[in-house]
Structure formats: C-alpha cells, structure tokens
C-alpha cells in the first residue's frame, strides 16, 4: 500500500521481483512498464486515489490515529509518537513490509522518543531517590541556616549567644555533608540499575560521578565506599561500549570503518551520509535524494561510495565533495563494496543484478544469476572474486570478468549480508534463517553458527567475526566460529556492523538512530564461551603451558594458558565433576560418576595428543574431588559416598575410610605429601594422615566447598558458604576469620608464591586477598556462581569457571596496577568530549585525570 501511495504521488518506483511488487501487479492495479511500476489506467487512479489509500493505510496501520495526528502537527507533536509496548508491536508489524517514507520517519522518531523517555524515567527515578534522602536534610539545613542568621544578628546584642551560633553552624555543615553522601549513594545505586539494564556506558558515567564526589569528602562509612567501588568496578571489567554517534534523524542502516582506522561513515533513511572521526567528532553530512542503504570506504580511506533506494551510486571524497553520481540500477541499491585494489566498485540491487563499475562511472560487468533481489556484495582480498548474497537464499561467487564460479546453497531463507575474511581463505554469510555460515572460497561449508534471531549484518577482520540482527545485539565470534560474547545492546534491530582492520573495534548501526562504538577492554580479562554448561572444575599444569576444564556438558577441554583450545575430550556417558594435573604435567586425572580416568599428555610438533592410559571404577558414586600426591605415587578421591579412597596409579585401592557426614567437595595434599585435607558439605574441613588417621577438624557454620594448603605448607585456608574465609595453622588454631563479602564462598586457591589468595563467590565474583586477609581486588565478569578457579604456574593469570558455563582468564599483572577511576575516565574521555547528548557540566567530569 505504501508503494502504491508513492506511485500515486508521482514517485518513479523501479520494478523488482520483491513480494510487495509481485502482489501489487497481481492485484491488477499496477503494471510493469519500461522497468517502472505504473497505475494500470486513469480510471483506477481516480477511484483508488490518494484519499482511498490514506483511508486503507489507516485501517492497516495499528498506529493510524497517532500517525495521522503526528502528520497533522507537521511532525512536531511528540505526544503522538509511540512508546513502550505499542512501539514494539508496531516494529513487529512493520517487519517485511515496504512502508512509506513518512511511516519510517514516524517509527524512527518514536524509537528516539521512547529512548529519551526511558532515559528520563531512569533520571527521574534517580532524582527521586536523591530527593527522598536530601529533602529532609536540606530542610534541616535551611532552617538551621536561617536560625544561624538570626543568631548572628543577635550576636551583636549578646556575645553570649556566639557559642550557640557556632554549634548551629556546625549542624548545618553536618546536614550538607549528609546530603552529599545521600547523593553519592543514589548515584551508585543508579549505576547498578543502569548496568543491569545493559546500559554499561551510562552506568560507568554515574559510577565516575559517585567516585569523584566521594573524593571530595573524608571519613565516609565503609558501606558507602564499597558500594561506589563495586559500581565502578563492574563497569570497568564488563563494559565494551566506549562512544556513541548521535546525529541521524532516522534509522541508521549502514556503517563502515576506514581501513586506516581514522574515520567512520554511516548511512540512514534520513537520506544522509555522515562522516565521523573515530573519536566521535562529526565531520561531514552528505545529502542523498532517497534512503541510503549501504556505505563503504575505498581501500586508501580517501573515498566513500554510497548506495541509495533511488538506484544511484554516489562516489564522495572524505572531504565531502561529490566525485561521481552513477545512475546504477532501475531499482534500489541494497549493497556496495570497493575492491581491495581500489579499481572497481560493486553494487547489488533489487533488480536481481550485481554490477561492477570503474571509478569513472563506466560499467565494467553486469552479473546476472540471482532469482530475486541481491542484498549484499563483497570482494575477495585479492580483488579477483565477488560474492553476492540474495533474497533467493543463495550466495554466489563470481570472477570479476562475470563468470559464475559457484552457487553456495544451504541457507533456508534470505541471505542478508556477506563478508570475506582477509586473514583467511574464508567468507561468511548471514541469513533470516537465524544462522551465519562460514565457507571456504571453493564453496565448502566450514561451520554453521546458530543464533535465536534473524542475522542481518556481518563483518570479518583480523581474527574476529561480528554479526548483528533482530535481537538488538552484536555478537563477536572467533574466525573459527567460536562464540566470544554479546555486546549489549541497542534498543532496536542492529542493521549493520563493521570492524576495524585488526578486529578489536566494532561499530554497530541501529534502527534506534544510534551508532555505538565498542572495543575490547584493556586485556584485563579474556572470556571463553565454549562450554555449554557449568564449569565444575579447573586445573592448571605445573609447567605453565596448559589448563583443563571439566563441564556439565560432559566434556573435558584442554587449553593453552593464552586461551587457545587445544583439545576437547568427549566420551559417552561421561559425567565429570573434578580433575587435576600430576606435578610433572604429563598426566591429567578426571573423576565422574563411575570411574577415575588417567590420561597421558604429549606434545608432538606443537600439537597436543592425549591418550587414555587407565580407567578404574569409582564404585558408582559421584566423584567431586580428586588429588595427587606431589611425588605422583598416590591418588585420593571423594564424593557423595562421604568416603576418601586412596589409590595407586595402577588402579589398586590402597585404603578407604569414612571421612564426613555429607558430600566431600574438595581434597588436597600438603606440599610435603604427609597430610591430606578434605572439605565437606557437613561444614567441616578435616586433616588426615594418609593411613586414614584423623589429625584435626576445622569447623565452619556452613557447607565448606573449598580449602587449600599454602605452598609453604604452614597454613591452610578454608572457604565456606557461610561467607567466611578462615586462616588456620596446621595444628588447628584459627588465626583469622574474614568476611568473604560474596554472599557465600565456594572455592579458594593460593598463588604459587603463597602471597595471594583467590576465592570464588556466590555473588558471581572472584576476589583476591592478601595473606593477611586484606581484600585486594573484586573481579566481576561471571553471570553465575563461581565454582572453580586456579592460578597459572607463573602467578600472572588466574582462571575461573562458573555456573554460567563461562571460563575467564584474568590478567593479574594488569589488574594489580589498575586504577579504576583513571581507567574509566580514559575509557569515556572521547564520549564526554564529542557526544552531543552529554550535559555540559559532565564534560569536565574527568578533568585532572591523567591520560594514559
């Protein structure tokens, strides 16, 4: 209906094979004439006229009344815009439809307005929280200051009232101080709320504000200090968004980062192209006569090509000068690309063709073969091949002379975008069938990446793939298809995504009218999203080369300490819960419901090989703990049968004894191998001789999941679900009890030098402690309880695993020297300086904070 309205208004609509055009032709109202859609005859045009169309569109639109009122106000009455559920319903209704420009403008304006209202609601909520706490204090302060003024006048009459006035002045100052503290608490609380709502950049700004205000006060209570530090800390470790580009008046449909990583270009249905510096500074606004659907930089970063729904290509200099206008197609241009050698431009169109153009505007080749609209086009790194993605569910590979080389079939719905991976002989396609597919350029399918929503954008640079889609996320993957993380989030569909040359910076363009810039944090942590279930146990090898993980997804995985997956072991009916390395790093042992398994590890030509050496029965009991003596002569196991069993490496049972009244969670040998300690659900840790004789019992007020001997052998620490970390001498004397500040502790481990202790918490955090029990660092990053952790042999990294199925490698060298406020301020510095939405007072938030 929107297309028919455009035709009646005199707009030339180029015919294509889309569903909407086909339905119009089949209706009998429209015919295809010389490549354009025309009303079949004047009688139809007079009967089914503009008034009729407006009436019918009003019936179709779920938002017709508010739309009509908005148009009547000349698009100025924001009270008529959609918000909340009404906006979501309208967006769902609009998917797959060709609407009028006014409809798109209305929806884009509604998205922007709804975004502002959400922000305003949060600000109001925060303000109310502040006001509720400040009102009483300010009222008191006001009364006291008035009273102080009266007393001061009276001082002229009686100096005896001077002392009383001084006291009242002091009270007024106290009230002002309490008001400031209340504001700090409210800012910290606001930061927490924004963070939970996936608005990490906004959360970081509020946390910085709280920290800066905190610095101006002395003698603040510990609880307030901790709330501010926690708010700032979680944004430092978890935020990836560092800037936003705001300026378009509609949906942003396309984005690209220049090859020299200095500029960003965006295209929108507001009929403009905008050029920005990487720091967010807007440099140029270039006008089109129709929606700009795709933009791309030349390989030398000096030119831009843009493709529009009016069928034209425009070639621009980055200084904003129009170099060439090419009337390329008789239908919309959906995709554009520059060849890496800079000699050709490719355009993909709704007319079902791909065309290759020389820079002077001369047609080099027309590629015909798709059965429907072509949505995307990309050149191979050597500029000799072109890939095209079509509405016909195929990807086609062409030589630049026009020869069709291969048709890649496998997608079950429209293919929206395609990108080559310059560092590999690979190409990636994304589709409405909820998948991304990685292909070799000979057409062989390498891997299919599955998601929960339609994927509409993709880029591949360096070692990374980025995809975007209808879930409002950007997803980052390794080039081998390993999922890394979600970048959350936009408030509407993410139409396009672009990566910097090294793949470490991403830009995403969305229907919410924003472009968000993302980057990896300062290598503080490396998340590994490979397991699909709880990480039950982790262990690092003593030679510092490997670590191992065992998961509820029934796999054991072996990793290089840099996070590269070396080997995955999958066995039928394997239900592993615990594992450990031998001291010589040549053996790994794993325990599950039925067996103890011993694997040999061998590196041959830099390739890790594993061989199963021995399996011996675990007596049909869930094993949750396994340990090996330092001399590699004895194995200890424990679990749900409450017993400790000692074995030799041939699988012979040496001794067994009942140790606890509940499950045994952890076992460990002392550094000299003389003692074994066990931690249990029954709230105790027990120290034993290897013959089963009890030496000491250490008690907590809750289940004990973790215990560890110090490397020096003179200390044992225990971690309990009662949220305490206890320090004991081996003779059983409690040296210190420390609050875990984690809603319960799960695991504990010593660094190799014995100077640092790490704990895992029910609150999803890892905490680092000094040997005296001082909390050094809180490390947020998991989204589930942390139930496994271990230091690498050099002590420079800590590996943790959680109930969320996530493994995190923490860079302790970086973390130990980190100043959270400096880090956060340097993270947001460009945003504060260049973003048009920042309040003027906030632009100076990080003044006097040193640049890196």
Image (cartoon, rainbow, N blue to C red):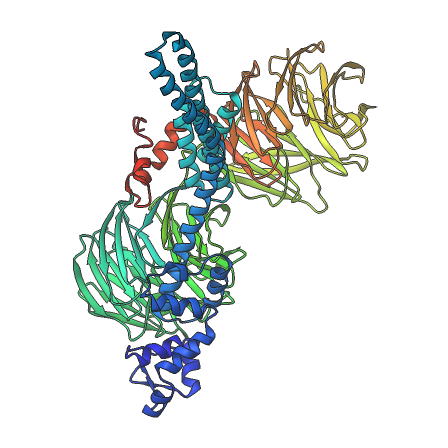
Asked which quadrant contains residue 581, the reply is: top right
Answer left or right for 274 relative to 510. Answer: left
Query: Which quadrant: the C terminus?
Result: top left
Q: Nearer the viewer, residue 841 or 656?
A: 841
Answer left or right for 51 relative to 538. Answer: left
Q: How many marks?
A: 0
472 shown above or below 347: above
Q: Residue at x 42, y 63 (%)?
A: 416
Answer left or right for 318 relative to 776. Answer: left
Q: Position of residue 198 (x, y in %)?
A: 48, 44
Q: Nearer the viewer, residue 214 or 338?
A: 214
Q: Residue reaching furthest front?
A: 157
272 shown above or below 728: below
Q: Nearer the viewer, residue 59 or 528?
A: 59
Q: Position of residue 676 (x, y in %)?
A: 72, 19
Q: Nearer the viewer, residue 346 or 762?
A: 762
Answer left or right for 583 relative to 219. Answer: right
Asked which quadrant contains residue 211, the reply is: top left
Query: Which quadrant: the N terminus?
Result: bottom left
Q: Position of residue 459 (x, y in %)?
A: 39, 53
- Is residue 260 visible in the rendered structure shown here? yes
243 shown above or below 294: above
Q: Position of residue 187 (x, y in %)?
A: 45, 34
Q: Residue at x 43, y 13 (%)?
A: 167
Q: Residue reaching furthest top?
A: 160
- Is residue 217 visible in the rendered structure shown here? no
């Amino acid at each position: 209906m929107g297309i028919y309205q455009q035709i009646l208004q005199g707009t030339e609509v180029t015919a294509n094979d889309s569903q909407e055009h086909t339905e119009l032709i089949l209706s009998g109202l429209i015919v295809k004439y010389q490549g354009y859609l025309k009303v079949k005859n004047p009688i139809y045009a007079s009967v089914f006229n503009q008034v009729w169309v407006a009436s019918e569109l009003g019936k179709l639109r779920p938002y017709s009344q508010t739309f009509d009122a908005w148009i009547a106000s000349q698009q100025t009455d924001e009270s008529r815009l959609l918000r909340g559920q009404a906006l979501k319903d309208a967006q769902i209704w609009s998917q797959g439809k060709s609407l009028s420009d006014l409809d798109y403008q209305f929806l884009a304006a509604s998205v922007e307005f709804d975004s502002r209202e959400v922000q305003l609601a949060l600000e109001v909520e925060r303000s109310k929280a502040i006001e509720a706490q400040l009102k009483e204090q300010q009222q008191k302060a006001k009364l006291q200051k008035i009273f102080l003024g009266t007393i001061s006048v009276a001082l002229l009459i009686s100096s005896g009232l001077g002392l009383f006035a001084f006291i009242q002045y002091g009270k007024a100052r106290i009230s002002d101080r309490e008001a400031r503290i209340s504001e700090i608490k409210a800012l910290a609380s606001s930061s927490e709320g924004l963070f939970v709502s996936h608005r990490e950049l906004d959360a970081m700004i509020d946390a910085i504000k709280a920290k800066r205000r905190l610095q101006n006060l002395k003698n603040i209570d510990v609880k307030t200090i901790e709330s501010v530090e926690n708010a700032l800390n979680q944004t430092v470790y978890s935020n990836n968004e560092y800037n936003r580009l705001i300026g378009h008046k509609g949906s942003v449909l396309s984005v690209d980062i220049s090859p020299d990583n200095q500029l960003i270009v965006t295209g929108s249905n507001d009929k403009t192209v905008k050029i920005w510096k990487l720091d967010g500074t807007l440099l140029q606004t270039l006008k089109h006569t129709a929606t700009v659907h795709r933009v791309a930089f030349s390989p030398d970063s000096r030119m831009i090509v843009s493709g529009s729904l009016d069928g034209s290509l425009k070639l621009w200099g980055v200084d904003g000068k129009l170099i060439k206008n090419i009337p390329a197609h008789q239908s919309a241009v959906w995709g554009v690309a520059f060849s890496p050698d800079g000699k050709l431009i490719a355009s993909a169109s709704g007319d079902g063709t791909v065309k290759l153009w020389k820079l002077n505007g001369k047609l080099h080749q027309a590629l015909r073969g798709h059965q429907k609209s072509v949505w995307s086009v990309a050149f191979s790194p050597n500029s000799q091949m072109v890939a095209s993605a079509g509405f016909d569910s195929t990807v086609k590979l062409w030589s630049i002379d026009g020869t069709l080389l291969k048709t890649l079939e496998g997608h079950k719905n429209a293919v929206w975008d395609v990108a080559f991976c310059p560092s590999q002989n690979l190409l990636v396609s994304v589709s409405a069938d909820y998948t991304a597919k990685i292909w070799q350029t000979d057409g062989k399918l390498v891997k299919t990446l599955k998601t929960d929503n339609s994927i509409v954008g993709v880029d591949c640079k360096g070692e990374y793939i980025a995809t975007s889609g209808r879930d409002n996320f950007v997803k980052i993957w390794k080039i081998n298809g390993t999922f890394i993380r979600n970048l959350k989030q936009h408030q509407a569909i993410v139409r396009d995504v672009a990566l910097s040359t090294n793949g470490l910076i991403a830009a995403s363009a969305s229907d919410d009218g924003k472009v968000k810039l993302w980057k990896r944090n300062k290598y503080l942590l490396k998340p590994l999203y490979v397991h699909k279930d709880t990480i039950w146990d982790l262990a690092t090898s003593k030679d510092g080369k490997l670590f191992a993980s065992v998961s509820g997804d029934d796999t054991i995985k072996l990793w290089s300490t840099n996070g590269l997956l070396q080997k995955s072991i999958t066995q039928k009916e394997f239900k592993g819960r615990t594992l450990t390395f031998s001291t010589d790093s040549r053996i790994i042992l794993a325990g599950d419901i039925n067996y103890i398994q011993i694997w040999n590890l061998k590196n041959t030509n830099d390739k890790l090989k594993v061989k199963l050496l021995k399996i011996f029965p675990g007596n049909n009991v869930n094993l949750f703990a396994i340990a090996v003596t330092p001399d590699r002569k004895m194995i200890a196991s424990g679990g749900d049968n409450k017993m400790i069993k000692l074995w030799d490496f041939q699988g012979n049972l040496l001794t067994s004894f009942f140790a606890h009244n509940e499950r045994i969670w952890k076992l460990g040998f002392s550094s000299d191998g003389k003692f074994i300690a066990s931690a249990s659900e029954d709230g105790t840790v027990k120290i034993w001789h290897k013959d089963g004789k009890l030496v000491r019992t250490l008690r907590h007020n809750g289940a004990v999941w973790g215990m560890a001997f110090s490397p020096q052998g003179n200390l044992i620490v225990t971690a309990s679900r009662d949220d305490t970390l206890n320090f004991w001498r081996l003779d059983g004397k409690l040296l210190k009890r420390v609050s875990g500040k984690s809603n319960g502790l799960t695991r504990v481990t010593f660094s190799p030098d014995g100077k640092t202790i790490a704990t895992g918490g029910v609150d999803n955090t890892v905490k680092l402690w000094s040997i005296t029990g001082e909390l050094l660092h809180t490390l947020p990053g998991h989204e589930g309880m942390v139930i496994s952790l271990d230091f690498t042999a050099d002590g420079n990294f800590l590996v943790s695993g959680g109930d969320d199925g996530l493994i995190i490698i923490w860079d302790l060298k970086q973390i130990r020297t980190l100043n959270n406020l400096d880090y956060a301020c340097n993270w947001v510095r460009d945003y504060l300086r260049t973003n048009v939405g920042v309040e003027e007072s906030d632009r100076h938030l990080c003044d006097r904070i040193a640049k890196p």
